[in-house]
Amino acid sequence: MLLASAGLLLSACGTPQLGKQSIDKVLKAMTLEEKAHFVIGTGMSGNSGGGATVGATDLLLPGAAGTTYPIPRLGIPAIALADGPAGLRIQPIREGDPNTYYCTHFPIGTLLASTWNQELVESVGKAMGEEVHEYGADVYLAPAINIHRHPLNGRNFEYYSEDPVVAGKIGAAYVRGVQSNDVGTSVKHFAFNNQETNRTANNAVISPRAQREIYLKGFEIVVKESDPWTIMSSYNKINGTYTSQSRELLTDILRGDWGYKGLVMTDWYGGDDGAAQIAAGNDMLQPGTDLQYEQIMAAIADGSLTEAELDVCVRRCLELVLRSPKMKGYEFSNKPDLEAHAAVTRQSALEGMVLLENKGVLPLKNVKNVAIFGCTSYAFIAGGTGSGDVNRAYTVSLLDGLKNAGFNVDDSKKDFYEKHIAEEKAAAQAALGNSSLAAFYPIPRPTEIIPSNAELAASARKNDIAIITFGRNSGEFFDRSSADFSLNAGEKQLLNSVTRAFHAAGKKVVVVLNIGGVIETASWKNIPDAILLAWQAGQEGGNSVTDILTGKESPSGKLSMTFPVNLMDHGSSANFPIDAEADVYFPDKRPDLGVKDVDETKYEEGIYVGYRWFDKNNIPVSYPFGYGLSYTTFDYSDFATSLADGKVKVSVKVTNTGSVAGKEAVQVYISAPAGNLDKPVKELKAFAKTNKLAPGESQTLDISFAAADMSSWDESKGGWVLDPGIYKILVGASAADIRAITNVEVK
């Protein structure tokens, strides 16, 4: 008996420990069963209630989305994976714990992209990462960088742009900021996840050229410029194969062509074959199921998957755990600097708000008494629903933001509005019942309250200005409806009634758009005196909007997507599930019923997405890509362009010619010569933003990009081709406001 005990003790002492012995030794010591378990998460404990939290992993971090599989005998701990991307999503209130664990709700993706400011986004990412680190998470499931193929994608609020250069550059800045805290990111959703309708089974049919030039390019930029710890494969299929089971995508392109060294994890319950995912190079399966374990073990038993292939994925999982804060024994504080981060979100939001219209009314001058209309003025939307939501301590409404700035706000209807909003929200939630997925379902916006003509006339007499806020919200599982794209009858009536009354009294009207994605504006944009696209600015939204309205900061945001005149003007509208029936399948998959754009979506527009489509077909738009007004004006001069050492270098002098300080985002496009391939009229290749320039101050921006970035993907040759000839370099303030055109010759 003593000899047996001594033998066990000797064996234990000789067992390699992760972090103390090499990964090779730890991997060699793992049993086949341990390896198969290790690449699979520990499951999803189900709904835990409490606002945004959907999945809870209580042992490590309450409210986290998932955990990795621990193997204590080898010194391998479990690490926590938590949702983003507008802020860390964890459980704020915990049973038996008097403390709270709120996180900062930062601005949504469309707002961050509209800043066109990579340094600013990196600083926001740094603040986010500090909360991830101090609350004990190891990997932050963000950013989300899929292309805005169509305005109705329910998750566009999380994504950045219709253009891959904007998506890639902003995404890379975000990753660098978060990972500066020694925590990981998971860039999602790789790839082609451009609709929410039937997202877990939809088959995206996309040409190789459109894949490379549009839908993969942003991910390529992020991988090469920020080295994310992990990539998250998407739910959908690509040309018949689940992305998480596509070796071409995950191994040949991601690792072979781009040189990616990190880990790939599935989206939660993505794909349908755990063995095929491992063979493809999808290293970790989240949140993990018993079926996936059985599939892997059965495939190894019958020889369709080798243990060596499994080892490749196990090694990457070990590498991820080894670099995690949990493995390093980091003693997180549970006390991130939420006050400092509230200041970050308030300030960062200012640069992404886009001034769409301004008939001399903004910034507000000689205004003291303000009338506000619209339910959203009282119930501001911080961000979208689902996994992109954040459990925050508060949201500043426009009402509160205006009051904080010292305005006398007519809040005589406040109680009435709040009662109306609460009743309609309660009724909508009651209609959903107690479904475990109720948190994902979008709650309809409350119907607008239309004051009587007498009430409006009285309001116009005693107030200096009227502000109307219109709101939109969306989230996972559901795409927006065509009705959601336009102002409804009540909103139009409110806009017309308020404007008529205040204009009759010689007063102005401002519209604030508290929305996550594109809406129709062409039919009504000339009615009010100003329109501020505030997006969803996070928890400090009302304060941030007020800072812009008052001129504390001049707006410098520009659109990272096109606002069309009509929804059907988009080329992708011919192949998008507009108003399709949208049942939720989670974690199950919808059976393939052959429904167009639900079961299979053909991307027939190819590379012509967003402004590329509108340019090619000469279709008028309401607001072009890159558009945004300011309280000041800018002059562009001293243009210079050169091509040397494989780089195109562009220099432009920007001068503030107005009367207030401001920033300007400068965009560089190319127009390629005619070759064997059809080419867009122009394509964005680089951008930069000035410092805050005082009136009369100038700054010279030196902007460069690789000459290879002017290449096109030639399907006949299976590679990138840079045609010789004269390339036009276009420097502009938007896609429709080109200030200079110069040439470079490629020989």
Image (spheres, rainbow, N blue to C red):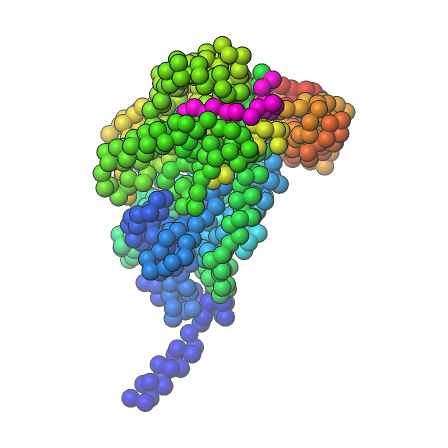
Q: Tell me if 552 is positioned left or right of 160 in this view.
A: right
User: Would residue 53 be seen by someone viewing this image from the given angle?
Assistant: yes
Which residues fall within the magenta stretch? 360-376
Q: Nearer the viewer, residue 170 or 284?
A: 170
User: In the rendered image, which quarter is residue 479 located in?
Assistant: top left
Residue 169: percent from the left, percent from the top?
57, 37
Q: From the image, which quarter does the C terminus lie in?
A: top right
Where residue 454 sits: x, y (%)?
39, 14
Question: Which residue is found at the position 32% from the left and 63% from the top?
Answer: 33
Residue 255, how many percent across, how many down?
50, 46
Query: Residue 442 location, x and y as percent?
Result: 33, 33
Left or right: 170 in relation to 83: right
Viewer-nearest residue: 330 or 414: 414
**Observer able to see residue 264:** no
Above or below for 320 versus 645: below
Please tell me which residue is depicted at 41% across the width and 36% down the height of the picture.
Answer: 384
The image shows a total of numbered marks equal to 0
Q: Is residue 231 above or below residue 529?
A: below
Magenta-span inclusion, residue 358 = no
